[in-house]
Image: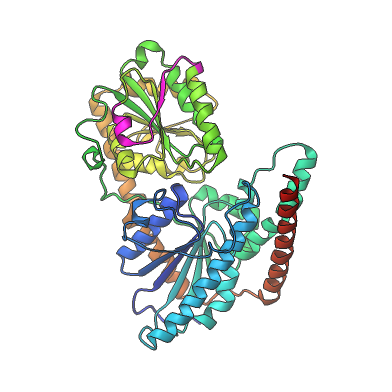
Amino acid sequence: MAEKQRSKPANITIIHPDLGIGGAERLIIDVALALQNTGHTVTIYTSHRDKSHCFEEARDGTLDVRVRGDKYFPASIGGRFVVLLAILRQVCLAFELLGEAASAGRDNGAEDEEADEVFIVDQVPACVPILKLLGPRFYKSSGRQRILFYCHFPDQLLARRGGGSLARLVKGVYRYPFDWFEGWAMGGSDRVVANSVFTRGVVGGVFGGERLGVVRVVYPCVDTARKGDVGEVEGGDGEVWEGKRILLSVNRFERKKDLGLAIRAFHGLGVEKRRGVRLVVAGGYDPRITENVQYHKELDALATSLGLQTATSKTVPSALSIPDSIDVLFLPSVPSAFRDALLAKSSLLLYTPVNEHFGIVPIEAMRAGIPVLASNTGGPLETIVEGETGWLRDATDVPAWTAVIEKVLYGMSAEEIKKMSVAAKERVEAKFSLRAMGEKLEEEIGGMLSSERREFNGAQQILLLLGVLGMGFAVFVALVLAWVRSV
């Protein structure tokens, strides 16, 4: 039997582990904005937010962001136990959230007694069984409660399992309960959506269709109303590097993003065709993360070994004042306004990751009317139209990437470039705008609320989960104590 129709916007609670700067964080911010724009009351709960290292909307009051579950466990110990600690932190967050909900219900009385409550969870599903089983007891509203899980990519496929055979065995044993838990916890959701058709296929292969039900696709988006302008940037008067043509790469400083491909393809142009051209490598960089620091050094060394002059700027004024002789400029954690200004100035975006689950940066470039050169794998296959909004090339074929760069810089007329720019903007508005995402989310939330809650017989299993977590925590403490004694 179908349930009652919605009479008013729902209360939306979004749960995300860390509101840093990255594609997943940008997506969650955009989900919140899209739903807030359609009249819902939106609150974001997170276990970590550094106001100096997050998107503007997460710190300037545009969105209601609350940090919970961060008091009892660190995010990692020496860079290890990240998964276990993420689960423990989110469990704490969930109980703090439920406690606040119960308190708010007592304070408000019957004021909002028919409001529907919708939880949107991504990345870590640890809170899903808790909200599913305990939510009705803590929320005093007579409205419906539903949980939507937004899957960027199965975490178990992101975990690194390299090394020798013994190391892989140990990691496999360590990861097994977490891999099982991921699928089980996601199964408590009333609906699961994925960020691309590519990701949906992977999710079905990993977890199977029966456990999660029909997985639908909700594409990430960009705000097409927001425009980049160098005048908005502190220290940014006038043109960005007047007289320079810019090739731009935007990604986190992680080895899997293969930013070296952009450097090698740029080098392939040769000295004469690089004259008056600059490659800018910008993106997420956290000095707390060892890989970010090491990979930046590796990229700088690669460029230098190829005879390219490099510089690194950590502020906008220093970036704008670098000498004309610099071929490759690294911009760690570039501010959003300056990134948009760079996109508006760039001739081409180089998007190098292989099998990227979706990839929001190509959409941001197309919003600015900039063509994209990307790997012919994963999400870009769904976002870029070959020859119309950009190009798709094999990431192992560096000369093919260089050929596209050369074509954009020297082989296309102004009319051809303008035609591609218009096509890119139209595609983003139709499929990847804030409006388009808001409409799709409304459809999914409406369908979820008008259907019965999915069954989740997890009472006994959640006791097992708590037991596993307790054992895991005991092992974790023992390992930490052993490590402390050894130093």
- Above or below 456: residue 344: above
Q: Which residues are magenta?
A: 305-321
Q: How many numbered marks, from 0 up?
A: 0
- Is 361 left or right of 210, judged from the image as shown? left
Q: How is the image coloured?
A: rainbow
Q: Is residue 3 visible?
A: no
Q: Nearer the viewer, residue 168 or 186?
A: 168
Residue 281 horizontal/vertical position (percent): 42, 31
Residue appearing at x 68%, y 57% in the figure: 178
Which of the image's four quarters has the C terminus? top right
- Above or below 393: residue 61: below
- Above or below 19: residue 38: below
Residue 93 horizontal/vertical position (percent): 53, 67
Q: Write down the quadrant of residue 283 in the picture.
A: top left
Residue appearing at x 48%, y 81% in the figure: 102
Q: Residue 462 colored magenta? A: no
- Residue farthest toward the left in the current orientation of the protein: 238
Residue 464 horizontal/vertical position (percent): 72, 70
- Residue farthest toward the top in the current orientation of the protein: 272
Residue appearing at x 24%, y 22% in the figure: 243
Q: Nearer the viewer, residue 326 or 123?
A: 326
- Residue farthest toward the bottom in the current orientation of the protein: 110
Q: Nearer the viewer, residue 209 or 223?
A: 223
Q: Residue 316 colored magenta? A: yes
- Is 472 left or right of 195, judged from the image as shown? right
Q: Is residue 188 visible?
A: yes
Q: Write down the quadrant of residue 276 in the picture.
A: top left
